[in-house]
Amino acid sequence: MSHSSKVKRREFLAASAAVASAPLILPQAVLGAQGKAGANDRVQVGFIGFGGRAKSLYSELGGLMQKGEAEVVAVCEVDENRLTAASKAIGPHAAVYRDYRYLLERKDIDAVVISTPDHWHGVQFVHSAQSGKHIYCEKPACCTIEEGKAMIAAAKAAGVATQIGSQGRSQPEAYLAHRYIVNNLGKVSKVHCFHYPSPVDESETPDSAPPPELDWDLWLGPLRWRPYNARYLPGTFRWLLESGGGQIRDRGAHVMSCAMWWLGQDGTGPVTVEATGTPPPKGLWDSAVDMYVTYTFKNPDWTLIWEQNDHCAVPAEERKPEEFKDGVTAISRPGYGATYYGENGTFVHWGGDGGTWAERKARQWVPPAGFQDVYQSPGHMEDWFEGIKTGKKTIMNIEAGVGVSNLCVLGNLSYLLGRKLEWDQARQEIVGDEQAARLMSRPQRYPYHL
Amino acid sequence: MNDPLTVAALLAAIQSDDENVRTQAWLRAGELGPAPLKQLAQVMAGGKLEVSRAAQRAMWRIVHVVGAPGATGRDETCAALRELLHDDQPVAVRREVAWMISELSQGEQDVEPIAALLKQENLREDARMVLERLPSENAVAALKTAFESAPDDFKHALAQSLRRRGVQVAGYPSQKLKPTKATRVKPVVG
């Protein structure tokens, strides 16, 4: 690399962040040998949280690490056993922290992957942006309307590339589905999402002292304090309204994300949201077991339904072995997806997260001359890295992520309050319901605040 | 429970051994307004684990029903909840009740009893957050007063609440980005 053409990594990344909308061409000269990025050009990544999902994300980063474009240099975890396991998985070159703010202090770290329970996403995202890091944050983006606003504002102010982990948009068959819908269905009047129920906590577990390896205070973070209970974690945080929110958030952030993307509705929102549901009859978890939510959109007029129970799923198409190709894998539990109702027909997809299956007719559709093509993601991580390097808008950027997350937030809020809500998309406010409007934000425990 | 609900019937159903009976009971609790709150708090404090949870969910149901647009009983519910903030109640009840008030209160009467909790170390952080949420200007005044006399380790949190409410505070900048918790783990070879 000649001296004159050398672009220092930090300067390059800072420049790309500063001109978020201006394409920045990576000169060949900054590449290392054999097409690999040189050491100075690697994006230095820190992981915030390293539980089950983070392990998958680390794996998904593997291709970029192999090409020398990314290197994981730090990891933090509030559970010391998990932190030890993370260190073993990543290697001794990666620094280990309990408190993510040590990681954010490091000027050599360019980007973070946030894979913590939902109640941490908003705060850690904002802090990361304020520390100048590019951000991949697990879905759903936010737990409250206020968090979403703060996340968008922080990312915009910092000029960082953001990607929310609704990776269904980047799946190979998501492209086929998107292309089929745009070219064949005509005006879509309804999308009906189907999903199996949220689980019931069958374990009658009282509060107790936290295990010694866990920093309970740091796990709770912005949530109001409460005693430790073993049913909050690991992973089960998603069945509590405060820290997760049930299937409508866990998978709604995937299935409804596909709908908003494929229908070109990012940036829009419903005018009304009405939810009904069945609460769990016992246990710590309080998210709805069964649920039915109607979102009404205007201009254009269409309806989005979120239904979760044990009888709403559209049976998945049988697949032949030869149909598993080009990165398409089996769906572990194909009891979720959505049906699209257009003026010229219907379309079904299953999954919507790490596995997305498009109905056969979409996969077999041969585009005619003059068809309308759609964006094909190179992969969710890869798309984020393109955003980091070129400043292009990512497929699930923070504005889109908050839009989808707000659907989940409003659905759960309507369920919790037991009444229909009216939403002003332009002002990002619930209108005509003072109590509901008050719940658009949630006071946060100091110092874990936005 | 298809009959008109009474406080006695609700309390009996909440304490049933049948989880479905308990659930159907707390779902209907809002029909009674604030009347059963005191007894529900007693059940919440003293019941078996799942009974206690059902009682707590019944209290929240009441808060959400009386908080609906056009609903009646909001002020009465706040008044009943205020009675449950006193020292004779367990901390767990007082903490939960403070948050219930945070969703409902519109008047000034709730500020003083919540502000009193700022002096109790195990409740002060909840009280601070609740005051931050209450729309009343008296809540801001209460935070200001508390800030003047608060111990130093609590002033930062109060300053944060005041800033959230649009008050300029000299000093005590937020420590939100300052790391404080070191790990004992060392990097390991896999």
Image (tube, coloured by chain):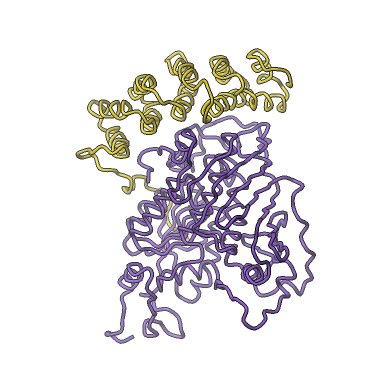
Chain colours: A purple, B yellow
Classify B107 as above or below A127: above
Q: To which quarter of the image does residue B166 belong?
A: top left
Query: Can you give x and y, in whole percent of width and height, for residue A95 in the image?
Result: 40, 59
Which residue shows up at 74% across the image and 21% down it?
Answer: B2
* Of the pair A42 and B98, the residue shown nearer to us: B98
Left or right: residue B38 versus residue B87 is right
Q: Is residue A315 above or below residue A66?
A: above
Q: Is residue A355 above or below residue B102?
A: below
Q: Is residue A342 left or right of residue A398?
A: right
Task: Give B184 or A15, whichever is nearer the viewer.
Answer: A15
| Residue A84 seen | no
Residue A85: x %, y % from top left: 52, 55
Q: How many marks?
A: 0
Is residue B185 at all visible to an observer of this figure? yes
- Residue B115 location, quadrant: top left
Query: Is A187 rendered above or below residue A363?
Result: above
A16 sits left or right of B78 in the view: left
Furthest-left residue in this view: B170
Q: Quadrant of residue A388?
A: bottom left
Q: Position of residue B110 (x, y in %)?
A: 39, 21
